[in-house]
Image (spheres, rainbow, N blue to C red):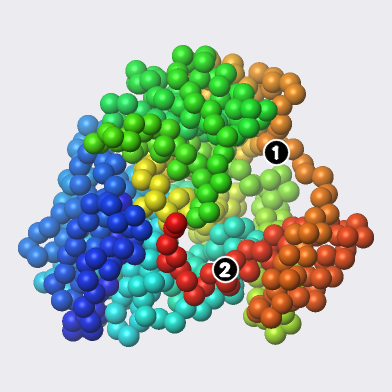
Amino acid sequence: MTAFAGLFALSGTLPEAITHNALARLIDRTVTHRQQSFTDGRLHVTKIDIGAYPTPSFHEDNGGLTLTAGDPILGRPNENVGDRTHACQLIHSTLGKGDLSALQASRGTFCGLSYFPKDQALYLFTDRLGVRPLFYTEFSNVLYFSTSLRALAALTPKPLELDLVAAIEYATFNYSLEDRTRYLGIQRLPAGSVLRSSKEVARTRYFSLHAKAEGAHFTTKQEGLDALYTTFQDAIRSRLHDSTDHALLSGGLDSRVVVTALTQLNREPHCYTFGEPSTLDIKIATQYAQRLNLPIITHPFEPCHFGPGWPLLAARLMNPDKTLENPTRLLWTGDGGSVGLGRTYITTEIESHLSTGNFRLAAESFCKPFQARILRRAYRPMIKGTPTSTVERLIRKQGACHPVNRMFAFLMENDQARHLDEFYENIDLYNIELLTPLYDAELVVTTLSFEPTYPLYHRMYNDWLDKFPTATKATPWQPYPGHIPGPAPLPPNSDYQWEPKQPTFDTLAVRELAQMALGRAPLSITNLVAATMACRLRVKDLTWVAEQARKIHHLTTHLGKPNDSVD
């Protein structure tokens, strides 16, 4: 199953009927995917399936049901792994007894629900890392839920109101923190969580990274690297489905190790990389694919007005023959590796503050300084201290583990948990599912058994590469700034992805925002005009302030029309 939405009466029956077709149209704007609905007067849920996986993720039993979007992957390879129906059966049988062990053993990227009419209870749940989103809200004694924020906002009769704190966080990080969404009162179920609804709604955590970080460490680095390599091989084998593999391949390390692991299992993935010919991504990816004798297609990025364009492009290249009855819909990616294994975003400055226990300075170093002056004066007290104080609090709450692991857990539960939100929000239009072995929960947990500072700056990652064929390190890759580079030199005359940008003094961008702010809360036209003048006189480059204002403007203007059709 790919996506679902529904509503559940916390007492009595649902106040009014909603048709299957109406609910299906909210989560499937193409109205072409396989649909199935369940209703019994108290619960109404509709699911769609793009047909990516060979087995359905749905189980009915004694009037109840369990369904999942994505693949839970319970156990190790050859233990019914890949059978999503079996996974739903196991989750249903254990959760019905109040037993969370099946969820705790999961390693995949998924979310789902279980319904037990005899107990009058509905459970919503997320994967251990929270990568597959699930949103919910309560209104007039009814619980509304959906895998799509857009669909949920259209489904609930609750008046839509901007959550200004979430908007500030989004403008700062490109995602909101904790369980917040752009809509006040609509929440995102956090990583490793179960929401139980009966007469009341209660939320519990069945998994947390910081608890795992407090466990024992490997005796030696070599022991740990061996365990990491074995776990990664299991993560790959657990996700093997199609006879033909398709994979993204960039100029970085993450997609490289995925593609390499596939070849070690005698698979020959078809590779795709997107960008301009002059970029290092294209040059390095092509070089590595040729070294492994793998087919690769390079293609410039194409614009997309509803989300990232690369999934549409990948889906088209994977299935050039549109007449196929069963097109390929599974795509391997390296998402999750740079943070999960390389600890990107924990800089030397942040590490220094963490080592002295100064979480406030660590939070300040992590947060870009949000310019509260782009807001009208009446709104500024509402976000005082945001988002730095929130980040500090979230780092501190990560148990009693090492400060670096606290920061890492914060990143995984916020940055990485939201990393693919735009993809999943538009999965009904993309028509593909992602296979993300670097988001394997067991793999991420394994990294916590090393000495906490060892994974920083890709140190552990670089040593781990010695477990792979020599071609893996013999071909250059694009290192993150301040992280350990590879032994092979980068190709000359190429555009380095992380090259520091020169000041642009983009007066047009700021002026456009100033015009947009006219008469529209919460932006201040006066201060945006001042930013325009500063850029025009080249006193200070405040284009990045315009980018923050643009994000807030976008959230404000799209608040009342969440389910626009895509033409």
Residue kind at label 2, given as amino acid type: Leu
**The C terminus, quarter of image:** bottom left
Amino acid on which disc 1 is placed:
Trp
Q: Position of residue 258 (x, y in %)?
A: 45, 29
Look at 77% across and 63% down and name the residue there: 510
In the picture of the structure, the residue carrying the numbered disc 1 is 498
Marks 2 & 1, CB-CB < 8 Å contact = no
| Residue 546 coordinates in the image, percent (x, y) | 73, 62
What residue is pinned by disc 2? Answer: 555
- Return the x and y of residue 339 as percentages of the image width and height: 55, 43
Disc 2 packing (10 Å; few <14; some 14–19; many ≥20): some
Q: Nearer the viewer, mark 2 or mark 1?
A: 2
Disc 2 is placed on an element classified as helix
Using the rendered image of the protein, determine whether residue 247 is visible from the camera's viewpoint. Answer: yes
Within the image, what quadrant is residue 135 found in?
bottom left
Q: Is residue 491 left or right of residue 467?
A: right
The residue lying at 63 percent from left, 63 percent from top is: 551
Residue occupying the point 36% across, 45% down: 431
Please indicate whether residue 144 sits to the left or right of residue 403 in the image: left
**Observer able to see residue 99:** no
Q: Is label 1 in a helix, a strand or a loop? A: loop
- Is residue 68 shown above or below 135? above
Left or right of residue 531, residue 158 in this image: left
Taking the image as shown, residue 441 lies to the left or right of residue 121, namely right
Which disc is residue 154 wearing? none
